[in-house]
Amino acid sequence: MMPLELARFAEVPFDADAPAERRLHLGPATVLAVAPAAPLAIRLLDGRKVTARPAFALPYHASPGDELLVIGQGDAFSAIGVLQGRGQHAIDLPGDVRLRALDGTLTLSGDRGIEMESAAVTMRAGKLDMIVETVSQCLGSITQFVRDRIAVQAGDSQIVVRESAQQIARNTVVLSEDTTTLNAKKIQIG
């Protein structure tokens, strides 16, 4: 069903007596098919199947089933807006790009997630706060340098190392309130 606000201009017949193929069309159209570097295959409200050139204010990659706002006449149509869409807005810019919130906070949010992909990612901050329910990491290797102190508080802790593990320190304290268990075939001290 068409939204109420669209019903008023579903198709604007500036020349109502003209045949449908010559009538100026301004209204919704449904995307039937999408092909790279080709006009969109669409169906107008009167059932005609035509093609439309994307002319969106913001870059948008339409998907079949999208409802677009289309203007045109004869066989020349342009898609000028997205009324209901499942496609993708994509901004591809050559060269370096800088995004900055002057005198404010930059917020990125996604209802179904945020993905970052790059050959390298660098983060610089005076302070980094993370509030996360669950963290999963899959790393080839990791190196951390902590200038002052590292502190971890956890309900339980488990570290499993397949080969060898080393802990080197000037002084080491192991403190258990109840039991400390060492289980090995051989224990060397000194």
Image (cartoon, grey):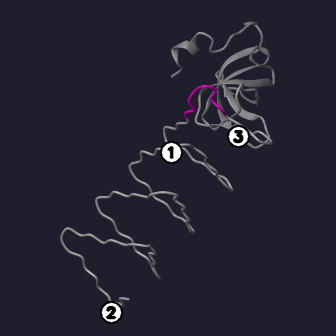
**Spot occupied by residue 183 in the image (x, y as percentages of width and height):** 29, 85
Q: Residue at x 52, y 14 (%)?
A: 4
Q: Amino acid at mark 1?
A: Leu
**Sequence-first tag of 1 and 3:** 3
Which quadrant of the figure has residue 67? top right
**Residue density around tag 2, few if under 14, some if 14–19, many if 20 or more, within 10 Å:** few
Residue 90, disc: none
Q: Amino acid at mark 3?
A: Val
Q: Residue at x 70, y 40 (%)?
A: 34
Q: Amino acid at mark 2?
A: Lys
Q: Residue at x 77, y 24 (%)?
A: 77
Q: Looking at the image, which is closer to me, 95 or 111?
A: 95
Q: Which residue is mark 2?
A: 185
Q: Which SS type dominates the magenta stretch? A: loop
Magenta segment, which residues? Answer: 100-107
Q: Which residue is mark 1?
A: 128
Q: CA distance from mark 2 to mark 1?
A: 44 Å
Q: CA distance from mark 3 to mark 2?
A: 67 Å
Q: Looking at the image, which is closer to me, 129 or 25?
A: 129
